[in-house]
Image (cartoon, rainbow, N blue to C red):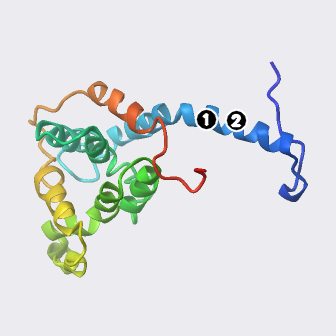
Amino acid sequence: MTELKAKFTKMIDGTAEDWSIIAESNMNEAADLPSKILDHLMMLGDDYGGFAVDRLTHSIQTATRAHRDGKDDEYVVCALLHDIGDNLAPSNHADFAATLLQPFVSEKNYWIVKHHGIFQGYYFFDYLGLDKNMRDKFKDHPYFDDCKVFCEKYDQNSFDPDYDSLPLDFFIPMVEKIFAKPKNSIYKK
């Protein structure tokens, strides 16, 4: 079967038929998004970054802790994916993860993921000559305490090689559910 393709070489020359082909292709790609995300998450399994556990194990531990604490599926998926950008965007991994999640999660969960890197710095920035209280510039933000709790209860303590994490397969239905349909998108009618 030959894949249909748009005929234009410049967007200005596109037709309704071209854009219909592109829209259908994008919808098909969106259906595969959960598996693409999980494939990328698996790449963290080879990356220790100097920690006692690889980054995949850290991510699964973070999600396991959030799940065992009764957090909802959206929060748990955010916990699972909060560091997904570590290997592609080490200087702004939190922004990478937040951008991936933004269309699918609440404003609060997006904000937590986007800012967790600075909040996590509370536990180590001073060892690197940075201000460990850098997060305080957000102290008046309504989600300040939420991000602080995320780092304190789930993220900073999830580098334990002996922790009994749930298997990644446990989280797959949650990932599929959260990424099934955007909640927030510039393309929504």
Query: Relative to 123, does residue 52 appear above or below in the rendering?
Result: above
Kindly identify the residue that appears in the image at 23 percent across and 44 percent down: 58
Extreme residue toward the left, this view: 162
Kindly identify the residue that appears in the image at 24 percent across and 38 percent down: 60
* Measured Cα–Cα span from mark 2 to mark 1: 6 Å
Image side of residue 102 versus residue 161, left or right: right
Viewport quadrant of the N terminus: top right
Under tag 2, what secondary structure? helix
Q: Identify residue for label 2.
A: 25
Of 187 and 81, the residue lying toward us: 187
- In the image, what residue type sits under mark 2? Ser
Mark 2 in CB contact with mark 1 (< 8 angstroms): yes
Query: Relative to 86, does residue 119 appear above or below in the rendering?
Result: below
Under tag 1, what secondary structure? helix
Tell me where residue 139 appears, x and y as whole percent.
Answer: 19, 77
Image side of residue 17 versus residue 109, left or right: right
Residue 121 can be seen, yes or no:
yes
Q: Quadrant of residue 142?
A: bottom left
Tell me where residue 71 appears, x and y as whole percent.
Answer: 18, 42
Kindly identify the residue that appears in the image at 30 percent across and 65 percent down: 115
Q: Quadrant of residue 89?
A: bottom left
Query: Relative to 54, does residue 3 appear above or below in the rendering?
Result: above
Of 78 and 71, the residue lying toward us: 71
Q: Quadrant of residue 72?
A: top left
Image side of residue 41 versus residue 51, left or right: right
Kindly identify the residue that appears in the image at 40 percent across and 57 percent down: 98
Residue 129 can be seen, yes or no:
no
Tell me where residue 87 appears, x and y as whole percent.
Answer: 41, 52
- In the image, what residue type sits under mark 1? Glu
What is the number of the mark on residue 15?
none
Q: Identify residue for label 1.
A: 29
Tell me where residue 175 appears, x and y as whole percent.
Answer: 37, 35
